[in-house]
Amino acid sequence: MAVVNRIADFAPEMKTWRQHLHQIPELALDLPKTAAYVAERLREIGVDELHEGIATSGMVAIINGQGNVQGEGPTIGLRADMDALPIPEETGVDYASLHAGNMHACGHDGHTTMLLGAAKYLAETRNFSGRVALIFQPAEEAIGGARIMVEEGIMERFDIGEVYALHNAPGLPVGAFLTAPGALMAAVDTFHIHIQGVGGHGAMPHETKDPVMAACGMAQAIQTIISRNHHTLEDLVVSVTQIHTGTVDNVIPDTAYINGTVRTFNPQVQAMVMRRMEEIVAGQAASYGVSAELDYEVGYPATINDSQKSAFAADVAGEVSGPENVEADGVREMGAEDFSYMLNARPGAYLFLGQGEGAGLHHPKYNFNDEIAPIGASFFARLVERAQPLAQAEVTAA
């Protein structure tokens, strides 16, 4: 089996949806145009319920399977993120962003379109038992919209038993799927270090407490966490990504700022990094005679697939794209994704869907490949039909 024939029929309509969404990129929780457009399409499609205003601009649409007008039976959740990024677009396409400074540089316009395509098919055919909950989520790129939706109780409110999501993947062949049982993506934390020294004339450093040298010492010492405090067989990234200080060549500044990211899978490794960073900042500050404050922000947890659900999802992907185009035991990566909060709340799986060669994610020339939208929609549709087949409901009723 390849792309579902009926979904292939409305591929041009999906392309229109996606390219419209591409023109109206919005950020974080503030998605008024995007949410309104998605809600309008869902009403046209004929979903049974539409619950808006979850996590400010998110929504959950319910489609009942055949014979389930009262909503009996299991509920499977399918999630798409809707937010964009604060990146000026450089694609040159004729449907480029109309919101200056913002663009869909991660393909969430395509993710939303794939779920809308699945919704249209499922609402027409209803060839499944129970219900499907279509989760349209804001703020994946910042804040953690998935966390907010989980905290607002969507899993309990809609009785969601399992949950799935897709992300496009530049560099993977068109239509290829990749996932893994267990850990797929890392937890992500952010650290900020604020250093207070005593500035002065660059010709008289002995009269200062130099925050520049303290910042350099801290940045170097932080790198020893991996080389000297960490077991090499555990995945860990600690990257210093910003150092800001000073304004002119002949003045030693009063302050310095260090920023960076930490990526882990093991909570014990995460705790070790936090402890060592506190010790390093305090020790280095004392050695340079400055004061320093560490602000360590714990971010998205690791994305952990349920082993059985990921194997099932990979099997469904094989139906759509062919088993030879599915990597079911892929290598985990150090990127992060707030779908992890939903996977912490319910078993499920997250998969990557290849969109061919082109600019990478978060690049100003990136553009979602409309060719893969029917593939993703077919995957979602078959996932529902396979997870909750009508035959199961009929056997139960008998």
Image (cartoon, rainbow, N blue to C red):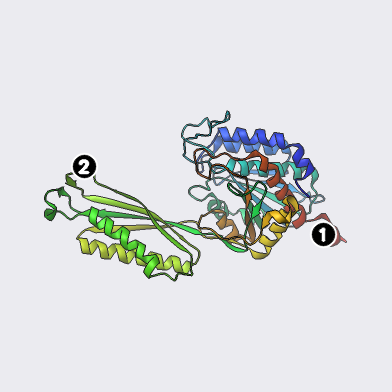
Q: Which amino acid type is shown beneath numbered disc 2?
A: Val
In the image as oriented, which residue stretches furthest toward the right?
398
Q: Image height check: is 363 above or below 205? A: above
1 vs 2, front mark: 2
Q: Image height check: is 224 above or below 101? A: below
Picture quadrant where residue 23 is located: top right
Q: Position of residue 381 (x, y in %)?
A: 73, 49
Circle 2 — which element?
loop
Q: Residues within 10 Å of mark 2 (few under 14, many from 20)?
A: few
Q: Position of residue 151 (x, y in %)?
A: 55, 55
For label 2, the residue is: 248
Q: Quadrant of the C terminus?
A: bottom right
Q: Image height check: is 17 above or below 202? A: above
In the image as oriented, which residue stretches furthest toward the top?
94
Identify the residue at image location x=30%, y=58%: 293
For label 1, the residue is: 392
Q: Which mark is residue 282?
A: none
Left or right of 358: which side holds 246? left
Instruction: Using the image as rendered, state which of residue 149 and residue 350 is in the foreground.
Output: 350
Q: Which amino acid type is shown beneath numbered disc 1?
A: Gln
